[in-house]
Amino acid sequence: MFLLRRLAGTAVVVALLSIGVFCLLYLAPGSVQQTLLGTRPATPETIAAIQARYHLNDPLPVQYLSWLGGVLRGDLGTSIRTGMPVADMLGQRLPLTLALTGYGTVLAVLVGIPLGVAGALRRGRAADRLVVTAGVVGLSAPPFAVGLLLLVVFAAGLGWFPVYGVGEGFADQVLHLTLPAVALAVGAVGMLVRFSRAALIRELDQDYVVFARARGLGAPAVLGYALRNSLVPILTAAGLIVTGMLAGTVLVEVTFALPGLGSLLVDSVTFKDVPVVQALALLLTLLIAAVNLLVDVGYSAADPRVRLGGRPS
Amino acid sequence: MADLPDVALTRRSLLRSIAIVGGLAAVPALVTACGSDGPAATSGDAGGAAKSLDVLKVALPSSISSLDASKEAGIMNYVVALLCQEALVGVGQDGSLQPALAESWSRKDPKTYVYKIRSGVTFADGTPLTADDIVASLDLHAKKGSTSAFAYAYANVDKIEAGGPAEVTITLKQPDASFAWTPSPGTLLVTSRTFIEATGQDIGTPTGKILGTGPYRVTEFAPDSHVTLERNDAWWGGKAPYRQIRLDFIPEESTRLLAMRGGSVDVALNVPAEQIDQWKAVSGVELKTASDRSLVTLAFNTAKKPWDDIHVRRAVAHAVDRDGIVRSVLRGHGQVATTVTDPAQWGGVLGEAEVKSLYESIPQYGFDLAKARAELAQSSVPGGFSDVLTYPGSGPQLGRAALTLAQNLKTIGITLEVKEVPLEQWIAELGKHASGVYLGWYFATTGDPSEYIQQLLNGAFVGENGSNIAEYADDEVTGLLDQAKKGTDEAARGKLLGEALVKAAADVPYQPLWWGEAATAFGPGVGAADFGPYFFVGPWAAKLSTRS
């Protein structure tokens, strides 16, 4: 029931978004035939041939419906810019973006939450202030600049990592993706530190913690209770981080010369390559919907009071 | 009271988190150790001289969308395609036409060109080159309804016929002397008929790739990442020095510089002018600059108010400090353009002395704000006016030049708003001919002096989508240019073109700013002997050598 409702909601969002993106691209400056031909001279015949080939002169609703018809039949269309089937293009780039986002999220969680917990436990002391300051710095550092800094230090200076590219074979790919993932994770760490620290501090001030301590419960057990109760805000932050990283990949991919979805989106939008932009919008919406769904499922696992699709508790 | 357990907890959890962080940091180090003897050769560390002769690693500043230059005719598309594909005629280092796939050619009469095809040439797939393949390659652009970006060059073609297995005859509708340049690499890349029929719409994509007769063939194409080329040992021109070429697309300038510093790149194209000193500082790196045959020019829309007033155009022309722009914006890596055509493009048409005297006779509007003010006072808008000038985001130097102009114009009462727009939008605006003033930025496709002159000044190209963005239609100039097209005598043609340039300059439809230069960085161990403006117009990697 819950899943069905969520799916219906997502479908409505996707449909509205596809119409919106379609119209915006139509209104955006530039024209496909001009971009294809560049600043060279063009004969009217060539322009007419290009317009006919890509149906550029059809009315907007007709263009949209013919695209929609293709998608409903499982055909995402062919890219105007590259001449490749859109599904193939996305298929080639999706794994990299997913790997980068996943790697970045894992790094952010592994670093951010322990630091946040440490800050909460040593509230007000030097260690805490250090953690909070580091969090603010991380949060406000643009991933693009962090990427360059990492390149200068770890790739050019120390020579530990390659400067750019994807690499071949699993180990080499992990190595190539480490610096980009760190660049993405830095901002996320800052956010996680703030959320987990704030959530844990609130829990540690609760009566049940004082009571548990008074009963002589061991410190790890007390922390366990407090942590579990602060999981809901942390999960929320994690969800935001994953979706934020999907957007952040655009700049990081450019810095590290990685062929992911971000660079594809930028190229396709400026080119007005409608089939690719539409498919990307669709894909990203679905990814974000999936992440949000996972977070919601996580809520109910972390806190039994939260029921999926049930009455307000 | 609760302090003590807290401290213990903190310390333990802190230690735990430190252990996690430490563990993470250690993982990549381990991976490095494992990976170094693995498949690192393609993307790895600074190789020795012996290793780098095996694989040449080239960094390109932007990705290409298609390997087929007739689908996307950007500079980088040619850099890749010309390693694999050739044309009927090539371009020599002096800018003259040279035999390539055509052993020889002749202009039988003003409308007929006959090409004799070189024998013993094979495509990279082993099949022999025939006249029929040439006809099929030409037809890609010349046939009716072609969507090729080269189609404009073939608009005047009447018939293309194979006269036997080794001869191709091209007949034009109207005589055109500059057609000799059409079957050069700028607007023709030869492939085989079988390949065209088998690959169809997939030509240029990662699955279809391209096929040619050049020194290399494409083995892998990953847009936004890289292209890998393998040597074609059967190339008729000999054996190219590198077994494999890997061209990586690295859009971020600083990343490219770091890659060269780290030794993971051997050659880097289009090094930005403001970074040249940093590149020079990398040990063993040799930086070579040459004209890139590009032109940046202000274009005034002579069909739009107030730019239809010659005094306004003269006033703005006088307000441009071209020497200052070349000195400060381009840091000297460019040349002040005194007209649209670079003096180096007249090879084979006019002699050096004639070019010199021609250029001295072209009227100039030098930087002089007093004159600018005086011209504006005589114009239809003596109190000044305001307009917008856009430039493409991929050309920040154009923007900086435009800003210095806007600054100068402000002092004489003209407000020029300088706006950056995406490349695609800028191209579309150039095509519309709706603005009053433009920044034109062109790269020559041929080495023919008439290319820019015809496209920018011939009255036949005014109107939407025309290349004459100044809407300049002077009967006398157009007459001279049409006559130049018909001529068969090169010297007479050069004279007509020169007359047109002088005549048009007096009307100031354009104020040319500079002829561009491109810098290429060659890493340790790579040498390029005869580097010049035409270095990349041809199988360039075959001309590289080792450098100690």
Image: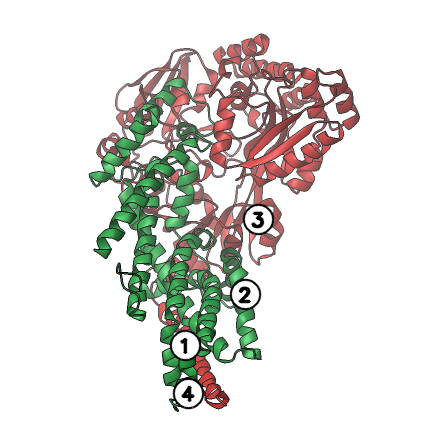
Chain colours: A green, B red
Question: Do circles 1 and 4 both sit on a common chain?
Answer: no
Check disc 3: other Cα within 10 Å, few if <14, some if 14-19, many if 20+.
some
Image quadrant containing the N terminus of chain A: bottom left
The amino acid type, in three-letter code, at marker 2 is Val
Tell which tag, 1 or 3, sits nearer the viewer: 1
- Label 1: state its secondary structure: helix
Residue A288 position (above or below residue B482): below
Q: Using the numbered discs, state the Cα–Cα distance from disc 1 to disc 4 in whole angstroms.
A: 28 Å
Q: Are marks 3 and 4 on the same chain?
A: no
Q: CA distance from mark 1 to mark 3?
A: 46 Å
Q: Amino acid at mark 1?
A: Ile
Q: Which residue is mark 3?
A: B287
Tell me what residue is drawn at x 53 percent, y 41 percent.
B531
Q: How many other residues sit within 10 Å of disc 1, few (<14), some (14-19) or many (≥20)?
A: some
Residue under mark 3: which chain is it in?
B
Pointers 1 and 4 in contact (C-beta within 8 Å): no
Reading the image, the residue beneath label 4 is A213
